[in-house]
Amino acid sequence: MLNIYFGEMEEAIYNPAVYFKNTYQDSWITNERSKAMIIKCLMRQHVGIIAQNGS
C-alpha cells in the first residue's frame, strides 16, 4: 500500500542514495585492520604526490 505524507517527517528518508552512502558502522573505520588499511592507502597517495613533484 502506498502512503503519501505532506510536510516534514523526522523518521522519513528524503534522499535514499545519500542516506545509504552516509550510513556506516563506526567499527568500519575504528578497528585495527581498518586503520592499517587507511594508513596504507594514505601513504601510497603521499608517495605518489612526491613522485609527481619530483621531490
Image (cartoon, grey):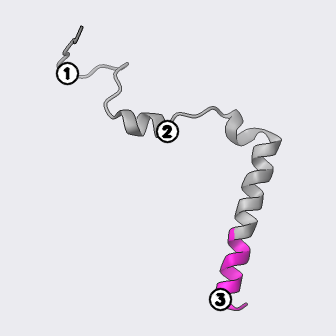
How many residues crowd mark 2 within 10 Å: few (<14), some (14–19), many (20+)? Answer: few
| Amino acid found under the numbered disc labelled 2 | Asn
The residue that label 1 is drawn on is 7
Q: Name the quarter where the N terminus is drawn.
A: top left
Q: Residue furthest front?
A: 1
* The residue positioned farthest toward the top in the image shown: 1
**Principal secondary structure, stretch drawn in magenta:** helix
What residue did someone put label 3 on? Answer: 53
Image position of 20 (left or right of 47): left
Q: CA distance from mark 3 to mark 2?
A: 34 Å
What residue range appears in magenta?
A: 45-55
Place of residue 12 in the rendered image (x, y in percent of width and height, measured from the top left): 34, 22
Asked if residue 19 is positioned above or below residue 48 in the image, the reply reads above
Q: Residue furthest bottom?
A: 54
Mark 1 residue type: Gly
Q: Give residue 23's position: percent from left, percent from top.
A: 52, 34
Q: Amino acid at mark 3?
A: Asn
Residue 18 on image: x %, y %: 40, 39
